[in-house]
């Protein structure tokens, strides 16, 4: 591509990206040069191709491939896969796995809304994750029903901060099973002093108190997410945190 930019004086790459429209402009310019200079393309063994013909023959497959990729990305949309035989279906991990190899199959995510054992609403989604289907489900249901449910009950698959905030802003009470509910009942989990769930929380000062009486700010715990929190806890106990922990600055 850099050789084409130098040879034909046409900029192809913008911000390290090449668009289909730019490649078509380049092809049009190459054929224009071919007609102006009356260059004949040759084929067969023993015939020398011109530099222009080599550029055109290299460019044509690029254009076709970019068309194919653009079409596939358009079909995917926000998904990461789709079925060739059914473009609306997404590859999902099924509960029934006869081969026991985690094979993905094209499927749809079916959602039911039930009230007193009656199905009040039903949607079919191409999104495999349950967390991303709750908000569209409730919005679509409210468009067709004459009332709005004040209490929403869902299993652990729907737990996410985004869903909690949506229900709170929508004046709805959430009854969603926490994803760590089962493991939180185990003795090992309850005796893990590094977990903030097992610490005493002071709402007035927004701090947590561990079992050794050390105070932890909420910002410190959030900062530690993704790292070895046990190692962090030992440093706090021995007062070896240095400048690694500090209160987050308040934004305007």
Image (cartoon, rainbow, N blue to C red):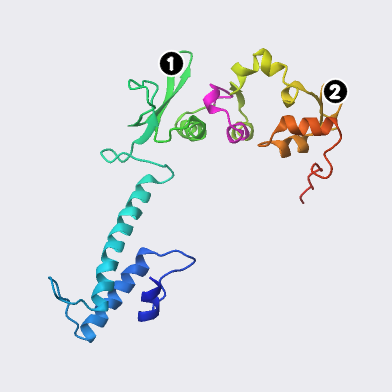
User: Could you tell me which residue is drawn at 46 percent across and 19 percent down?
Assistant: 114
User: Could you tell me which residue is drawn at 25 percent across and 73 percent down?
Assistant: 54
User: Could you tell me which residue is drawn at 39 percent across and 76 percent down?
Assistant: 5
Secondary structure of the residue carrying numbered label 1: strand
Decide which of 140, 22 is in the foreground and name it.
Answer: 22
Q: Looking at the picture, how far across and down is residue 191, in whole percent?
A: 73, 17
Q: Quadrant of the N terminus?
A: bottom left
Q: Is residue 125 left or right of residue 223?
A: left
Residue furthest toward the front?
A: 46
* Residue picked out by circle 2: 212
Mark pair 1, 2: CA separation: 52 Å
Q: Is residue 210 left or right of residue 98?
A: right
Q: Is residue 206 visible?
A: no
- Residue 161 in the magenta stretch? The answer is yes
Decide which of 157, 243 is in the foreground and name it.
Answer: 243
* Residue picked out by circle 1: 118
Above or below for 28 versus 229? below
- Residue 119 in the magenta stretch? The answer is no
Q: Is residue 131 left or right of residue 168?
A: left
Disc on the earlier residue, 1 or 2: 1
Secondary structure of the residue carrying numbered label 2: loop
Decide which of 152, 39 is in the foreground and name it.
Answer: 39
Q: Quadrant of residue 238?
A: top right
Above or below for 61 versus 50? above
Give the magenta part as a residue range.
149-165
Residue furthest toward the bottom?
A: 37
Q: Is residue 25 visible?
A: yes
Q: Looking at the picture, how far across and down is residue 75, in whole percent?
A: 35, 47
Q: Looking at the picture, how far across and down is residue 66, in whole percent?
A: 33, 59
Q: Looking at the picture, how far across and down is residue 96, in whole percent?
A: 36, 20
Decide which of 17, 53 is in the foreground and name it.
Answer: 53
């Amino acid at each position: 591509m850099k050789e084409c930019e130098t040879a034909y004086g046409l900029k192809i790459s913008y911000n390290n990206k090449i668009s289909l429209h730019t490649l078509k402009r380049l092809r049009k310019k190459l054929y224009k040069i071919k007609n102006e200079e009356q260059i004949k393309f040759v084929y067969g063994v023993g015939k020398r191709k011109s530099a222009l013909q080599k550029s055109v023959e290299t460019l044509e497959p690029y254009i076709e491939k970019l068309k194919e990729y653009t079409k596939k990305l358009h079909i995917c949309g926000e998904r990461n896969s789709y079925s060739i035989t059914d473009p609306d279906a997404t590859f999902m991990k099924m509960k029934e796995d006869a081969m026991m190899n985690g094979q993905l199959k094209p499927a749809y995510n079916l959602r039911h809304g039930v009230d007193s054992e009656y199905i009040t609403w039903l949607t079919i989604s191409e999104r495999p994750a349950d967390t991303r289907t709750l908000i569209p489900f409730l919005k679509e249901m409210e468009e067709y029903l004459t009332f709005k449910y004040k209490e929403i009950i869902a299993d652990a698959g729907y737990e996410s901060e985004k869903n909690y905030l949506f229900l709170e802003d929508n004046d709805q009470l959430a009854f969603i099973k926490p994803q760590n509910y089962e493991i939180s009942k185990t003795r090992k989990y309850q005796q893990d002093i590094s977990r903030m769930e097992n610490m005493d929380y002071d709402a007035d000062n927004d701090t947590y108190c561990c079992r050794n009486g050390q105070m932890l700010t909420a910002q410190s715990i959030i900062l530690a997410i993704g790292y070895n929190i046990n190692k962090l806890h030992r440093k706090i106990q021995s007062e070896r945190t240095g400048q690694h922990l500090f209160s987050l600055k308040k934004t305007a």
